[in-house]
Amino acid sequence: MAENSAVVAIYNTHTEAEASVKELQRSGFDMKKLSIVGKDYHTEEHVVGYYNAGDRMKVWGKLGAFWGGFWGLLFGSAFFMIPGIGPIVVFGPLVGWIVGALEGAVVVGGISALGAGLYSIGIPKDSIMQYEAALKSDKFLVIAHGTPGEVARAKGILDTSGAGQVAAHHGVSAA
């Protein structure tokens, strides 16, 4: 089992989350180790759409410009319908962790597919419940993972980025 470290920041608005991602990028943080999660608001628009074709992605809807801005910056993207939370958009390696959890039938113990993806990288269940509640409340998550040193550096940046809460998690992967 590999040791994983991650830091999760909760933002009240998409502009705050976007600013933190840009600050991490400016600092040289590896964008392949960064994920962002938020509710999808396509249902509020007349035109609804999301697609990923190779390295190109397009999102329509209330936050289309926000989500679309991440397609070239972060690695991987997906749309999930999570029972109890609703439609969410995920960018970054968390997409693979969620899909891996679903394919491996890791979704147990009352946590969602999103929770299973977070749990698979060592985030404890009580924190997962808190992050899912934040998403239900229309907040955004920015997740940086890597070595303990990389996570400590990312946490330092996220601590000063206007997040409502920032928490580091160090543990052993459940995978």
Image: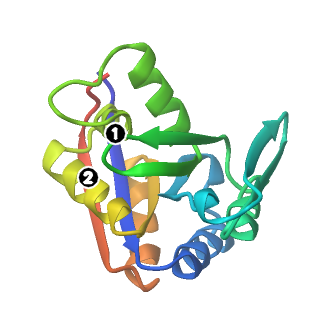
Question: For residue 166, which quarter of the picture?
Answer: bottom left
Amino acid on which disc 1 is placed = Asn
Residue 60 pos. (x, y %): 76, 59
Q: Secondary structure at mark 1?
A: strand
Task: Decide which of 75, 47 is in the foreground and name it.
Answer: 47
Question: Local crowd at mark 1 within 10 Å, few (<14), some, or many (≥20)?
Answer: many
Q: Which residue is mark 2?
A: 169
Residue at horizontal 28%, vertical 25%? 107
Question: For residue 27, which quarter of the picture?
Answer: bottom right
Q: Secondary structure at mark 2?
A: strand
Residue at horizontal 36%, vertical 58%? 7
Residue 71 pos. (x, y %): 75, 53
Task: Decide which of 9, 66 is in the foreground and name it.
Answer: 66
Residue at horizontal 39%, vertical 79%? 163
Whether residue 122 sits left or right of residue 154 in the image: it is left
Q: Is there any visible trace of residue 37 in the rendered image?
A: yes
